[in-house]
Amino acid sequence: QSPAYLTRKAQTQAKYLIGLKANSVALSFPFYTGTVTSTKIAAGDRTPTPERLGAVLQVFEDAGLRITVRPLMDETSLGGLPEWRGTLRPSDLDAWFAHYKKFMGPYVDVAQKHKVATFTLATEFNSLEGDPRWESLVHGVEKRFSGEVGYDANWDNYVKGRIDMPV
């Protein structure tokens, strides 16, 4: 779709949200990996480019809405339960974190440009919670992004106590 089409669709959504008296919006979009042991992070057919995401963010920014951006790993390539994003076991954690940082960087930059309030850096990565590599990744994001940096924990981890993520 053209940028003009995206802008018109986003304007329709912004008007609808404001009509509901909403003051915020969260935008989720998928990204992909191979298997649970893969070290690669990639865009897919349904992943917006940072520029296309920016066009939508501009509309919501102009509408005065508080914005959250939430990239979400699509699990279709993981083969179904019991495998899901919470069971990732990258064969090389250093490579996985390097790919993750590289992939998220342009999205963090577009979020900063459009004054996004919260960037949810990761969602439901149970098996990777507590990994010390998150510290440097989060620190790097905080240098580029002045809003809140968040993590969405899976519901089952809340019963275990504190979620070990540096956000």
Image (cartoon, grey):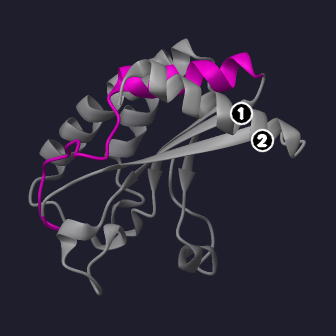
The answer to whether residue 84 is left or right of residue 140 is left
Callout 1–callout 2 Cβ contact below 8 Å: yes
Q: Label 1 belongs to which residue? A: 14
User: Closest to the observer: 118 or 80?
Assistant: 80
User: Closest to the observer: 121 or 167?
Assistant: 121
For mark 1, give the secondary structure.
helix
Q: Which mark is residue 17?
A: 2
Circle 1 packing at 10 Å, graded few (<14), some (14-19), many (20+), is many
Within the magenta stretch, is there residue 61? yes
Q: Is residue 85 visible?
A: yes
Q: CA distance from mark 1 to mark 2?
A: 5 Å
Within the magenta stretch, is there residue 43? yes
For mark 2, give the secondary structure.
helix
Task: Please identify the quadrant where the C terminus is shown.
Answer: top right
Q: Dividing the picture into quarters, in which one does residue 156 lie? A: bottom right
Look at label 2 and name its amino acid. Leu
Look at label 1 and name its amino acid. Ala
Residue sitting at 63 percent across and 18 percent down? 115
Measuring from the top left, give residue 142's x and y in whole percent. 51, 24
The answer to whether residue 162 is left or right of residue 135 is right
The answer to whether residue 35 is left or right of residue 49 is left
Measuring from the top left, give residue 60's x and y in whole percent. 66, 26
User: Closest to the observer: 87 or 108?
Assistant: 108
The magenta-colored residue range is: 35-63
Circle 2 packing at 10 Å, graded few (<14), some (14-19), many (20+), is some
Measuring from the top left, give residue 29's x and y in whole percent. 42, 46
Residue sitting at 36 percent across and 70 percent down? 86
Residue sitting at 31 percent across and 47 percent down? 46
Task: Please identify the quadrant where the N terminus is shown.
Answer: top left
Q: Dividing the picture into quarters, in which one does residue 127 lie? A: bottom left
